[in-house]
Amino acid sequence: MRNSAFLSFLVSIVLLLSPVAQAQEASVAPGTQVRGLLINEVEAGADLITASSKISEAVLTEGLYFDAEGLAYLQQNRQSYESMVTLLNENASGFEITIAGLDSMPEIPTQVVTIAMIFFPESADEIYGIASQMGMLSEDDALLAAINAGIDPSTLTATAAGADGNNVSPLGVGTGAAGAGGGDTTVSAN
C-alpha cells in the first residue's frame, strides 16, 4: 500500500511539473533550440558541416520550433538557412548571429536579417538596429526582412543604432482632423 501511494504521489508530481517544463521550452528562442541540437551533434563527433546539414533537414522535415510562415521562409531559402545554422555553433544570440551572418554572407543581407529574426524573434528590435547601423541594408529593406520574419514592424526602432527610426505608422494616421496629419475626412468633390 505504501509503495502504491508513493508511486501515485510521484506520478502526480511529474504530471504537475510537465506543463511547466513545456512552457519553459516554448519560451526558449527557436535559434537556441536549433543550436542545442547542433552542439549535441558536434559533441557526439559529427563534423560541423554534416551536423548543420542534418539538423537543418530534421528541423524542416519535422516542422520543429518555427511557425508555419518561418518554416516556409527557411525552406525557400534553404542554403542561407543551413549556413546560418552552421554559424549557430559559435553564435548564441540574435546579436551574434546577425553580425556573423552579415560578415560571412554580405551578398544576401536581407535573408541574413530575416533568418536571424526567425531564429531569435525576441531580439528582432536589436537585429533591426544592427542591420540599420551596419548600413548593409536600407531601412526599408530591414523592415521588409522583419515583415518576412513575421515581426510587427511597428515594434521596431532603430534610433539607438543611429538610424532615423522606423517610420511605419498605423493605418489612418495622416488623415482626419484629430491632429495626426493634414486634412479632414471630407471626401473631395474633385
Image (cartoon, helix red, strand yellow):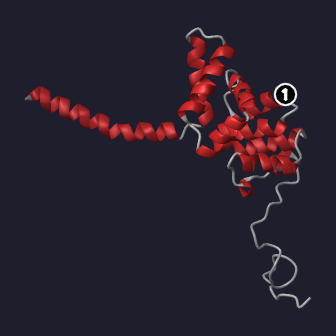
Secondary structure under the numbered disc 1 in the rendered image: helix
Q: Say whether residue 102 is left or right of residue 23.
A: right
Q: Is residue 180 left or right of residue 16?
A: right
Q: Is residue 48 above or below residue 183?
A: above
Q: Residues within 10 Å of mark 1 (few under 14, many from 20)?
A: few
As drawn, the residue found furthest toward the bottom would be 189
Residue 58 can be seen in this image? yes
Q: Nearer the viewer, residue 75 or 7?
A: 75
Of 144 and 19, the residue lying toward us: 144
Residue plotted at (81% across, 80% down)? 179
Q: Position of residue 80 (x, y in %)?
A: 75, 30
Report x, y in % for residue 21: 42, 36
Q: Position of residue 159 (x, y in %)?
A: 83, 51
Residue 88 location, quadrant? top right
Task: Please report the residue visible at 32 percent of the width from the left and 40 percent of the height from the top.
Answer: 16
Please identify the quadrant where the N terminus is shown: top left
Using the rendered image of the protein, determine whether residue 33 is visible from the camera's viewpoint.
Answer: no
185 displayed left or right of 121: right
The quadrant of the image that shows the C terminus is bottom right
Q: Position of residue 184 (x, y in %)?
A: 83, 85
In the image: residue 50, left or right of residue 16: right
Q: Is residue 182 above or below residue 63?
A: below
The residue under label 1 is 103
Q: How many numbered marks, from 0 up?
A: 1
Farthest left residue? 1
- The type of residue carrying mark 1 is Asp
Dividing the picture into quarters, in which one does residue 58 lie? top right
| Residue at the (88%, 32%) spot, across then down | 107
Residue plotted at (80% across, 50% down): 143
Q: In which image quadrant can residue 87 be found?
A: top right
